[in-house]
Amino acid sequence: MRSAVIRNFGAAENIVIEKAFPIPVLAEKQVLVKVKAAGVNPVDTYIRSGTYASLPALPYIPGREGSGVIAQLGTSFAVVSSDFVYPLPMNTTFNEGATLGIAYNTAYRALFVKASAQSGQTVFIHGISGGVGLAATQLAKAHGLQVIGAASTEQGTQLAIQNGASQVYNHREQGYIDRIKQENPAGFNIILEMLANVNLNKDLELIANFGTIVVVGSRGSVEIDPRRLMQKESSVVGLLSTHITVEEYKRTAEQINKLLESGHIKPHVGRIFPLEQIVEAHKLVIDAEGALGKIVLIVDQD
C-alpha cells in the first residue's frame, strides 16, 4: 500500500512515501480502514523527532487520527482497533472528520475529564487558534463556559472569536499577562496549556483559587515554585492522548458526535496538503507564525 513511513526518528525529511508498504494483517477486533484524510498534530512532530514521552517501534506510519471507510481493497489503509472506530455524522466531511481523533478528544478530556468544567466557569486557552484550541473553544462555548485566550496573529485572533471566544490577547505583545490580570482580576477556573515550557509560570499568575491548569503540550522542561500552587490551592495536571481508555473514548465520541449533528461544533480545517507533501505539513505545524486550525493530509479522495 502507499504510505508515509518513518524508519528513523529525526527531521521531517525522514518521512518518506513508500508505494509498496505491506498492508497490515488484521487481528481480532480490528478493522481495515481505507483512509480518506488524516490530521497532522504537534504530537506527530514530537514522535517523528523522537522527543515524545512515548515512542512507537520502527518503522512507523505517522499520524494518530483520520477518516475513511471500512474496506477490504484499496491503496491506502490503516488497521484500527474496532473500539476506536466511530461513524462520522452525515453533516461532517472526511476532511473535517480527520480532525476529530486528537484535537476534539484532547479538548474534551482536558475540559470535562481533567478539569471537570461546568457551565458559568471561565477558561483561558494559551494557543487558542490551533487545532486543540479551537476545538476547546467550541466545546466550552457549547457547554456554557466563557472562553478567553491568547494567539499570536490578528488572523488567529479573529478565527478564535468567530469560533466562540469572547476575548483574545496577542501573546507577542509585551505586558500582555499584566493586561489579562487587570481585566480578569478573579483569574480563570481552567487554563488549557499547549506550550507549558514557555507559559506555565504565566499560567500560575492567571489561574483562579482552586483552579486547574491542564498541560496538553510542552517542548521542554520548566521549573516552578510549588508554593504558588499552595497559595491558590490550584492544580496542574497532564494529559497524554494515548492514555484514553476504550470506555472514555466511546463516551467522548458520543458527546462530540451529538454536538456535530446539532451544529454546535464544526471543525475548522486550516490547511490541506496531499500526502506527498507530508514533510511540508510537519514543518508548518512547528514553524508557522501562528496556528490557524488543523492541518489535514489528503490520502485518498476517490
Image (cartoon, rainbow, N blue to C red):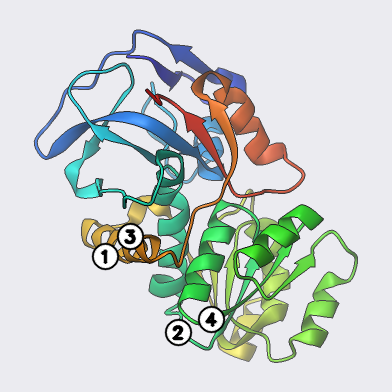
Can residue 222 be spotted in the picture?
A: no
What amino acid is found at the position of numbered circle 3 in the picture? Answer: Asn
The residues tagged by marks 2 and 1 sit, at their Cα atoms, a distance apart of 17 Å
The residue carrying pointer 3 sits among few (fewer than 14), some (14 to 19) or many (20 or more) residues within 10 Å by Cα, namely: some
The residues tagged by marks 3 and 1 sit, at their Cα atoms, a distance apart of: 10 Å
Label number found at residue 174: none
Residue at left 51%, top 60%? 135
Considering only order in the chain, which callout, 4 or 1, is on the residue closer to the N terminus? Answer: 4
User: Crowdedness of circle 4 by 10 Å Cα count: few (<14), some, many (20+)?
Assistant: many
Q: Are marks 4 and 2 in contact (CB under 8 Å)?
A: yes
Q: Is residue 11 left or right of residue 82?
A: right
Query: Is residue 157 shown above or below 16?
Result: below
- Please report the residue visible at 53 percent of the width from the left and 18 percent of the height from the top: 276
Q: Nearer the viewer, residue 57 or 165?
A: 165
Q: Amino acid at mark 2?
A: Gln
Please give left or right for residue 97 compared with residue 8 in the image: left
Residue at the front extreme, as displayed: 91
Residue 174 shown left or right of residue 9 in the figure: right
| Of marks 3 and 1, the one in the foreground | 3
User: Which residue does the numbered mark 4 point to in the structure image?
Assistant: 145
User: Residue beneath label 1, please?
Assistant: 251
* Residue drawn at point x = 27 percent, y = 63 percent: 254
Q: Quadrant of the C terminus?
A: top left
Nearest the eye: 138 or 2: 138
What x and y, as percent, mark residue 93?
41, 43
Disc 3 on helix, strand or loop? helix
Q: Which residue is labeled 2 in the image?
A: 118
Mark number displayed over residue 257: 3
- Residue lying at the far right of the rendered structure: 174
Callouts 2 and 1 close, C-beta under 8 Å:
no
